[in-house]
Image: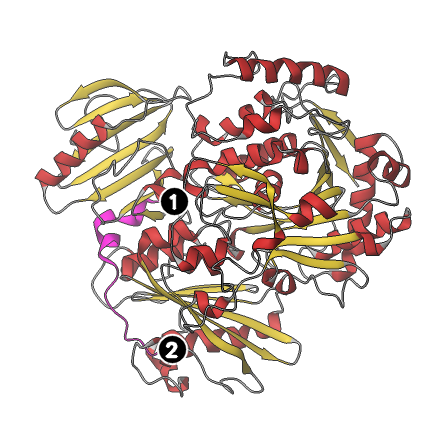
């Protein structure tokens, strides 16, 4: 499905002006034979997002939420729900896309932060399509899972996001070098709501993100073993070192510092497992769920110590 | 197949009988009141934000009080061929899952079990979860199955109320008068979406001339959960939550009209936790919940059901696991939804949630999702044990696996 938003398909985007104004990203009546808007578009902002998202809005807000546009479409008994999120930037939309189950695009160059335009980010499920481009995240729901509606869902996706020019891949993808991450496990975090879902390091902004993003997910070592890895890149090595100090100082009471050294430390957790935090240039790398105490330097994940 | 095993994999002895449980619960309650650690807890209780849960604990229990007639007993009734999605024809198979599960719970036939929980003059509320409509909401055929059982055994349909906190979500999830003729379908509160979205300056759709919410009268001023956390003092908060102080009032539907409650949540995650039986009933019975999510999310799941309006009326829980969602919740995320073909049945919602939490963690791990197993995510199960509301210790609860 990676072709859906490609330039070749823009010819079909008859009612999209090319502007990124959301009004022009909400397909009109007749976008597909017999399909019409069902009711007026509803707009939600940060102060009233919880009206629409009954539980779970905190994560959306944490990633950087600006507005949500909800439109229903119907033809006879069939109906589709269209929800277009305008987030604060491409990483914010990526964070939400991954959290909702969006898959990496087939094109490997883009996801690894290579040169060239951003690939299409679309995940098609018979009952729900997810897509993102630039700061926008789109979800189209077909609760009955009627497969005959998939072309209609594709058209909605194309007409909404296809008018946006492809940008560059979100910078964080290049920083985190995602090649070794386990497919489907990668998530972004920007604050405690997303981070707490993965691991409890401590309270507050333990990674010193200051509004920036980090990545976590399953990471495969050369020997085949898998650990959970957190990666945050900072503006420079000084800030990365400050973040390491902050993390060490704020460690949750359930974690015990057992080895402290220049550029990193090792800890044990409530489950008797180990973790470590180390600086790599201007990045902070943290691993958890290690079955054995890691050595102070070296190892397959830290060949340079 | 009827596989009755303890959580540790060994053949379980019978779960704690009710008399033994009540004795233990009484000791636990005493320990709580006296402020000393009790023997049921793995760890001492952490410091909590002040609430009025102690008031609830003073009120004498009834024979139906949580954890109900079967403390710690959870039946996992599973079939391999229940339609995974959109299968309205699956009602018959869902019915079989429910009835066989109920039989395993009570040791009696489904129809004979009716009289254990209900009499024909009861007014029964069915609390559903309509969030994620169609994808991961409570399925109408599960509710139809329960209603058919109630009606077949003499409960008038006019004595049944399908309810959620917000009225507008029920229709989207398939709970309409057309589908459920003769049954009441109600939200605890109404709302003015246009005003909330800033589309109009006229707030008369939700605010009365005296400044109160139009739904304020639908909540009981004498029955409330108090927590030392105040809500935001803006119109949007008041519009959505009816009140914005430190009180969360129970809906009058729950306090005055219903005499029994059946809780039918869905099997789904909520971040790293779950949003199932206890979350569904706790947050769906009161107003002014927005203030509670961040500081007291799990405590609310325990302490609201501790009040007699829930504790003594909630007699049956059926967690709808026809589909399950292991990540992306509580919003619907189709990529993480899979057909479980399972109903979980029990009177003890904390035992049910603790069993389902374990299944959820296993599923998340199997699917490569990073799982945070910090004790804080399961502390509320121990809190429920301390309050005498449930049996969640894996060594003491009874998990019955049933294949239909």
Residue shown at 49% from the left, 57% from the top: B240
Q: Quadrant of the C terminus of chain B?
A: top right
Residue shown at 53% from the left, 57% from the top: B334
The label on residue A182 is 1
Name the chain under label 1. Answer: A
Q: Nearer the viewer, residue B235 or A125?
A: B235
Give the magenta part as a residue range.
A163-181
- Residue for badge 2: A25
Q: Secondary structure at mark 2?
A: helix
Residue A223 is inside the magenta segment: no
Q: Nearer the viewer, residue B116 or A107?
A: B116
Q: Is residue B355 visible?
A: no
Question: In the rendered image, which quarter is residue B245 located in?
Answer: top left
Q: Is residue B154 left or right of residue A71?
A: right
Please provide percent x and percent y for residue B217: 60, 54
Q: Quadrant of the N terminus of chain B?
A: top right
Vertical arrangement, residue A7 with respect to residue A190, above or below? below
Q: CA distance from mark 1 to mark 2?
A: 33 Å
Say whether disc 1 or disc 2 marks the residue closer to the N-terminus. Answer: 2
């Amino acid at each position: 499905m990676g072709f859906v938003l490609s330039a070749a398909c823009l010819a079909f985007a008859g009612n999209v002006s090319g502007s990124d104004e959301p009004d022009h990203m909400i397909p009109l009546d007749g976008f597909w034979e017999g399909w019409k808007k069902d009711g007026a578009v509803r707009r939600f902002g940060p102060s009233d997002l919880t009206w629409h998202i009954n539980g779970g809005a905190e994560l959306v807000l944490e990633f950087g939420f600006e507005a949500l546009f909800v439109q229903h479409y119907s033809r006879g008994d069939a109906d589709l729900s269209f929800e277009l999120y305008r987030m604060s930037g491409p990483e914010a939309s990526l964070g939400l896309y991954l959290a909702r189950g969006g898959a990496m695009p087939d094109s490997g160059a883009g996801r690894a932060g290579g040169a060239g335009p951003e690939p299409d980010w679309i995940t098609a499920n018979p009952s729900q399509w997810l897509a993102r481009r630039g700061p926008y995240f789109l979800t189209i729901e077909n609760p009955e899972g009627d497969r005959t509606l998939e072309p209609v869902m594709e058209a909605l996706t194309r007409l909404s996001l296809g008018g946006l020019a492809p940008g560059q891949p979100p910078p964080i993808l290049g920083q985190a070098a995602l090649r070794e991450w386990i497919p489907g496990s990668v998530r972004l975090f920007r604050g405690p709501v997303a981070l707490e879902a993965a691991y409890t390091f401590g309270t507050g902004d333990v990674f010193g993100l200051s509004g920036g993003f980090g990545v976590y997910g399953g990471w495969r070592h050369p020997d085949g073993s898998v650990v959970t890895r957190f990666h945050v890149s900072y503006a420079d090595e000084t800030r990365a070192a400050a973040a390491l100090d902050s993390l060490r100082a704020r460690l949750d009471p359930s974690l015990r510092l057992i080895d402290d050294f220049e550029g990193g430390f090792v800890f044990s957790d409530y489950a008797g497992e180990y973790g470590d935090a180390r600086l790599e240039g201007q990045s902070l790398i943290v691993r958890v769920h290690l079955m054995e105490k890691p050595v102070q330097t070296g190892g397959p994940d830290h060949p340079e110590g | 197949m009827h596989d009755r095993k303890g959580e540790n994999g060994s053949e379980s002895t019978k779960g704690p009988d009710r008399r033994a449980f009540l004795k233990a619960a009484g000791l636990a309650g005493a320990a709580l009141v006296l402020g000393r650690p009790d023997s049921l807890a793995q760890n001492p209780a952490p410091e909590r934000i002040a609430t009025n849960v102690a008031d609830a604990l003073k009120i004498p229990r009834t024979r139906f009080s949580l954890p109900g007639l079967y403390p710690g007993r959870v039946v996992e009734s599973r079939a391999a061929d229940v339609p995974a999605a959109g299968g309205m024809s699956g009602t018959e198979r869902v019915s079989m899952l429910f009835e066989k599960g109920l039989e395993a719970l009570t040791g009696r036939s489904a129809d004979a079990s009716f009289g254990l929980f209900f009499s024909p003059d009861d007014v029964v509320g069915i609390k559903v979860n309509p969030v994620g409509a169609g994808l991961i909401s409570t399925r109408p055929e599960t509710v139809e199955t329960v209603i058919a059982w109630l009606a077949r055994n003499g409960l008038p349909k006019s004595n049944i109320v399908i309810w959620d906190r917000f009225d507008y979500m029920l229709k989207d999830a398939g709970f309409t008068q057309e589908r459920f003729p003769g049954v009441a379908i109600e939200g605890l509160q109404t709302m003015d979406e246009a005003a909330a979205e800033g589309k109009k300056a006229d707030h008369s759709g939700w605010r009365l001339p005296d400044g109160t919410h139009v739904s304020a009268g639908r909540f009981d001023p004498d029955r409330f959960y108090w927590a030392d956390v105040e809500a935001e003092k803006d119109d949007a908060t008041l519009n959505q939550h009816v009140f914005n102080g430190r009180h969360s009032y129970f809906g009058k539907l729950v306090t005055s009209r219903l005499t029994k409650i059946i809780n039918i949540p869905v099997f789904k995650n909520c971040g790293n936790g779950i949003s199932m039986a206890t979350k569904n009933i706790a947050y769906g019975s009161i107003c002014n919940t927005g203030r509670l999510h961040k500081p007291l999310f799990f405590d609310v799941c325990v302490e609201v059901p501790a009040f007699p309006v829930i504790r003594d009326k909630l007699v049956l829980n059926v967690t709808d696991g026809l589909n399950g969602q292991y990540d992306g919740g509580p919003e619907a995320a189709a990529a993480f939804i899979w057909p479980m073909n399972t109903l979980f049945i029990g009177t003890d919602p904390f035992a049910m949630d603790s069993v389902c939490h374990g299944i959820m963690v296993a599923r998340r791990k199997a699917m490569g999702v990073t799982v945070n197993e910090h004790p804080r995510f399961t502390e509320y199960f121990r809190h429920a044990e301390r309050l005498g509301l449930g049996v969640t210790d894996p060594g003491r609860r009874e998990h019955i696996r049933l294949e239909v």
